[in-house]
Amino acid sequence: RVVLLDEISKYKKRGNIQDAKGRTTVYPDTKKLFIFSSPAVYSDDPAKCDPLLAEIESCDVAYQYHVACPDCGVEQVMTFENFKWPEQRGLLPGTSVADPAAIRRLKSAWYECPLCKGRWNDYKRDKAVLANMETGWQPNKQVEFPQSIYVHYPSWLSPYMSLSEVAARWLEAQDDDEKLQKWYNLIAGATYTYHKKERPYHQILALRDDRPEGLVPSVPISAITCVADMQKRGFWYKITAWGYGLEQESWTLKAGFVDSWESLRLIMFESQFQDVHGNQYIVTLRGMDSGGGEGEDHQDLSRTAEAYLFAAANPGVVLFKGRQRMARQYNVTDLDRIPGTNKPLPGSAKLYTIHTTFFKDKLAGKLQVSPSDPGAWHLHKDIDEDFAKQMCVEFKNNQGYYECPKGKDNHYWDCSQMELALVEIAQVKIWQQPEEVHQGQQGRRIRGQAIQA
């Protein structure tokens, strides 16, 4: 008849809430269900929405506590916008802005009554709360016989939470999304809206140089990579030239979309490029994601199975599978079976599980390097806005993982992080430049090394 649910915002399975409610079914008139929880992060995705918000929205009425000002007697709801604190100049050497440690130590923050401008310290706050114990809880609307009510209780109503502690934690949380989320959830008793920090796409376009599509730069090239992001229908691909050295400078040669496995094979194995001196270059390192979903060319096979067969039939193509958390940058599995069947794989292939957070962090860093600095990420002059926007859609959520908004394309971003994984696996950064390679030497055909399948 009485059910208590605690911290439902942290439940992994939201169905548990409905299961708990179901236990009160046989007590239609006398049941009592209590939910105690701090909020979590707001999301417009129903699958990720804080379950507490859904419960709040379903309540008939919401109650907030109204305190009575010790100076003017006016009842009011305490809000954080009325918290004040001094700048604390001179209290610590070199300090010129509000200092959380000094505010906490000196208890120098106060609450300002918006009507009489009276200053409340912790003692006055306690008086304001106690003065209205009988009539302080007031509904936001009048409802006859409400069946469900919501009560909001921020921490600054409690005598155990100093006003200075509230202010100090707020200041400490600035520019730190994780701390700011905790402040909103635990101190203010409110949901936190994570503000996505998107990279302006014009910053990507600023990485373009004066090369036309397909022209290799006139510098010694260690490898040319081709990676593909597999879709249910077709593949997005990206081809990049890499210089020698630990700085891993790179130049995008070509990027686009093909709609068949044969077209992808031609892109990976028969593409040829040249520099201004006529030197010929071919792709030397190849990789693609192992995908998922129903296959298009073989209705009885998954898209992943098709990728396994493609890699086995084309030695030198490695497969990728991403994970957000790993102890290592990558690990490798030898493939010998067609997924979803008991049939042996006709040939050999390797699946690299890669630490996507690590490589996306590395990619984000690369995109900040100026084109004139070592290790830059160069794009050819024909790269368009669609490419640039795809490189900007993913953002880090409050858990520190990259997230792509629904309905947004991020194929070139995925290709770029796979490129970084590919050259890391092949250890291109430690390859030695052959002595016979000289800038301006004409008529050479550049081959390079490959990952052994």
Image (spheres, rainbow, N blue to C red):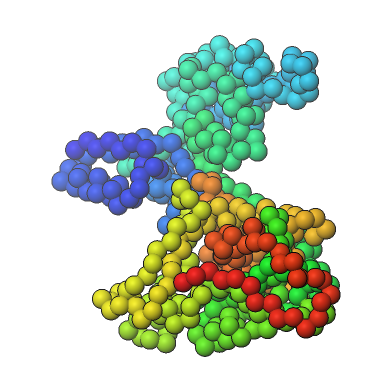
For this orientation, the residue located farthest to the front is: 435
- Percent position of residue 312, x then y: 42, 78
- Percent position of residue 84, x then y: 68, 23
- Percent position of residue 407, x then y: 55, 68
State whether residue 360 is above or below residue 146. Answer: below
Snapshot quadrant of residue 165:
top right
What residue is rendered at 59% in x and 27% in y?
169
Q: Is residue 311 left or right of residue 28?
A: right
Q: Is residue 252 left or right of residue 206?
A: left
What residue is rendered at 42% in x and 20% in y?
134
Q: Is residue 211 visible?
A: yes
Q: Is residue 290 left or right of residue 250?
A: left
Residue placed most toward the observer, 317 or 111: 317
- Percent position of residue 281, x then y: 70, 79
Q: How many numbered marks are there?
A: 0
What residue is rendered at 40% in x and 48% in y?
51
Snapshot quadrant of residue 273:
bottom right
For this orientation, the residue located farthest to the left is: 26
State whether residue 62 is above or below residue 99. Answer: below
Residue placed most toward the observer, 290 or 319: 319
Q: Is residue 413 visible?
A: no
- What is the quadrant of the N terminus in the image? top left
What residue is rendered at 36% in x and 35% in y?
36
Residue placed most toward the observer, 164 or 216: 216
State whether residue 130 is above or below residue 249. Answer: above
